[in-house]
Amino acid sequence: MLNQFHIVEMVSIWGLYHYISEILGINLMPVRNEQGKKLIQSVIRTLRILNCFEQDKELQIAEISNRAGIGKSTAHHLLMTLKEMQFVKQDPRTKAYSLGIQVFKLGYAYFHQMDLVKAARPFLQILSDRTQETVHLAELLGDEVIYLDKIESLQSILTRSRIGTTKPAYCTGLGKALLAWQKDELLHQIVDRINLQSHTEKTIVDRSMLLEELEQCRRRGYSIDDEEIEIGLFCVAAPIFDISGNGVAAVSISCPKYRIEGRMDELLSLVMQTARDISGQLGHTVPMGQKPE
């Protein structure tokens, strides 16, 4: 049975919903679907806005408002929030909206967990078991690497990485393994636009030196991150190729630098074999050192 305090609380919450809705120009009140489940109207409208970009790359706010079936004022408020969270971006000249980087990050994380990660996971587990170190699976996203999978070491020192997050490609083992096997034209485009910042005293911040390092990675068949992004962290990585011979991902072993002593040859052999095994699952048969034309 409701007492006066419950009634006052309900009225206050109800009033708060209406107040915020009026101020923001969006409907925060829950609605019910055909099964009677409560849904939040503002979330539905936000997702309708994102769905507007399925067919068109760029849209003006009037087009978004019309397609989503919401008022321009409401669309504006929701778009500002999406822009702040990097789910959409706006062209400063035309004022048109398009999908932001966060949508692509989520899409990449989902898509590749369905196929690539499924194919790679058994081999990552074997690599982790044999080395007792942290192993990663990642791919290139612009000039960054995005982590698709990770098996954490049970040893005391853990690495700072999470599935779905990104790190600079130029100063990570995974990133250099991926950059090294890009076509020359694309590689130079990526390197030219990278803001080469120093993370440690070992970070490569000269473009010519970076290109030379990537050439060495390609000749060796693997890459190394020797405290380039974080002091004390060492990483060896190798590229993974698809059926067309394109470098689509990379696998790595990460550990504190003091744990590689006397193990370097073993770790390199294991990470390269794992990359070959995963590449084979993707249909690749060409030698790993071959660069795409």
Image: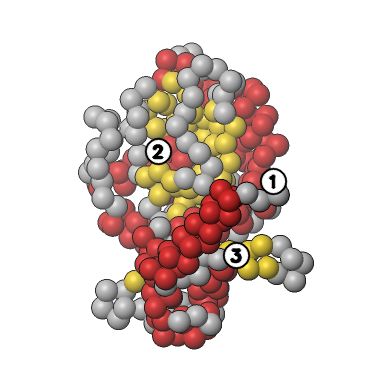
Mark 3, other Cα within 10 Å: few <14 / some 14–19 / many ≥20? some
Residue 208, given in percent of the width and then of the height, sits at: 25, 47
Q: How far apart are marks 3 and 1 (CA)?
A: 41 Å
Total marks shown come to 3
Q: Of circles 3 and 1, which is in front?
A: 3
Q: Mark 3 points at which residue?
A: 30
Instruction: Identify the residue shown where x is 67% and y is 36%.
Output: 123
Residue 127, given in percent of the width and then of the height, sits at: 63, 29
Q: Which mark is residue 119?
A: 1
Point out the tag, 3 or 2, that comes first from the N-terminus: 3
> What amino acid does circle 2 point to?
Thr
**Contact, mark 3 vs mark 2 (Cβ under 8 Å):** no
Point out the tag, 3 or 1, that comes first from the N-terminus: 3
Point out the tag, 1 or 2, that comes first from the N-terminus: 1
Mark 2, other Cα within 10 Å: few <14 / some 14–19 / many ≥20? many
Using the image as rendered, state which of residue 163 and residue 226 is in the foreground. Answer: 163
